[in-house]
Amino acid sequence: MEENKNILRQWVLSAINNRNGKELKEIFETIPNIDIADAISDVEDPKQLLYIFRVVGSEYSAEFFAELSNDQQEVVINAFSDKELIDLISDSYADDIVDTIEDMPANIVSRVLKACPKDLRGDVNRLLNYKENTAGSVMTTEYIEMKDSVTVKEAIETIRTKGKDAETVYTIFVRDNKRTLVGTVELSDLIFSKEDEILNNIMDKDFVSCNVNDDQEEVAKMFKRYDLTAMAVVNNENKIIGIITIDDIVDIMEQEVSEDIAHMAAITDMEEPYLKTHTFKLVLKCVPWIIALMILQMFSTIVLSSFETVISQFAILAVFTPLIMDAGGNSGGQTTTMIVRSLSLDEFSRKDYGKVIWKELRVATIIASIVAVFSFGWLMFEMAVGIVNTDSLTALGRSNIAGDMALVSLLVASTLFVTMIISRLVGASLPFLAKLIKLDPAVMCGPITTTVVDIVSLLTYFLLWTQVIGKSLGLL
């Protein structure tokens, strides 16, 4: 894949540098725009980029421009004359223009809007004003709508006339005299219907639409659930004001997955590719979470400090502290990941919290039992063969070394049993808590779960020793 990308890059740059317009046109006729844009993603020379737009026909230039990086788009806009910019904008869809300018400097935004035809400028301005990550912010206004009284013949003629300017011709949106959305018609239904049939008789009245203020992630779930390629976006009065197509949904899904991965790793959202993100910006994305988690880990420090005397007296307890903390954190992280995934796929809702906790309690008990039995045997083996130094066991003041090894192994196994159950219940609960307070569940994954479980496991470990085992044997 990378080799093909390099070959394409050399091919494109060779055509540009040799001013071979014929070869460059051939490339655009045979290679998808996105592949070409990806191949020359590091090219920011205005002369090279402008040559492409001045040679390649308008049927390719607008789509190619939409696939360029923000930096490249800004270079092109700054280098274009007003006429060239107007020609480019006129061939672009409103949602693509919004995606281009929303993060650009004000002077660039002003120049692009000035180049937009009046109707297109109104659409772009309206899209820019919708709340970020809502259906309104990602919808396009280039779609085909018709009245329900239109005949099939008239509808097909309209598609032939206006279809090239629409985002999709496969779904036609039908409205009544009051502009209220009343149905949809697939292109295939038009083709196989009689010419004199009116749309009201063949349209799908059981259609799916979304509100302009709906969250884009919820819209993506609707596309998956109902197997859609296009969906109408309506206002509070059920008037159609735009549509969202499957290509928009693919972009949304990629964005949401990137956000979830960033949150699970305790990083703020990455708006740009890693290699294009400034070093200092990467630092700012990581440092706040690291510091916040360090502050939260203060409670672990308090626990260790509270049992400092016990740790110094029975040093062997410190040997197994990392094992207990890591095992608990890993177990809780597993549960959180599964619950976040299930919540995101709508496999259950907040109302199912009780069912989830009951099931997780059963799963946790079985896993904890297996881990406890295994850890007891494994720790006995480690101490028996000398992997773990047992010299500090003499602090117990007992002559039965094998019994002392069993005692410590039992302590660790018991701690792991309790910790596993608590960690999995905590890991299952945090995503529900996030949903309740309207946060992205991924934010409370991984690091937060691990930190909370670390505190719980340390408390369990030392309390079992001081309050149960140590006291019962008269060691404390």
Image: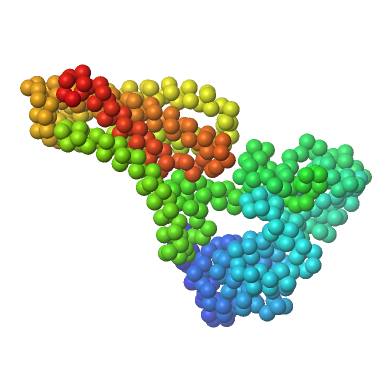
Question: Is 435 in front, or is 382?
Answer: 435
| Image height of 239 relative to 72, above or below | above
Between 422 and 363, the residue placed more toward the observer is 422
Residue at point 12% right, 23% down?
402
Farthest-out residue, top: 472
Looking at the image, can residue 376 be seen?
A: no
Q: How far from the left and from the top, in percent, is residue 160?
A: 82, 57
Q: Quadrant of residue 306?
A: top left
Q: How is the image coloured?
A: rainbow
Up-down relation of residue 46 to residue 187 (above or below): below
Residue at the spot x=26%, y=30% of the render? 462
Q: Toward the viewer: 397 or 78?
A: 397
Q: Is residue 160 left or right of residue 350?
A: right
Q: Residue at x 52, y 35 (%)?
A: 433
Can the viewer see residue 111?
Answer: yes
Left or right of residue 194: residue 404: left
Q: What number of labels is visible?
A: 0
User: Quick one: quadrant of the C terminus?
Assistant: top left
Query: Where does residue 191 sit, x and y in percent of width and height?
Result: 81, 46
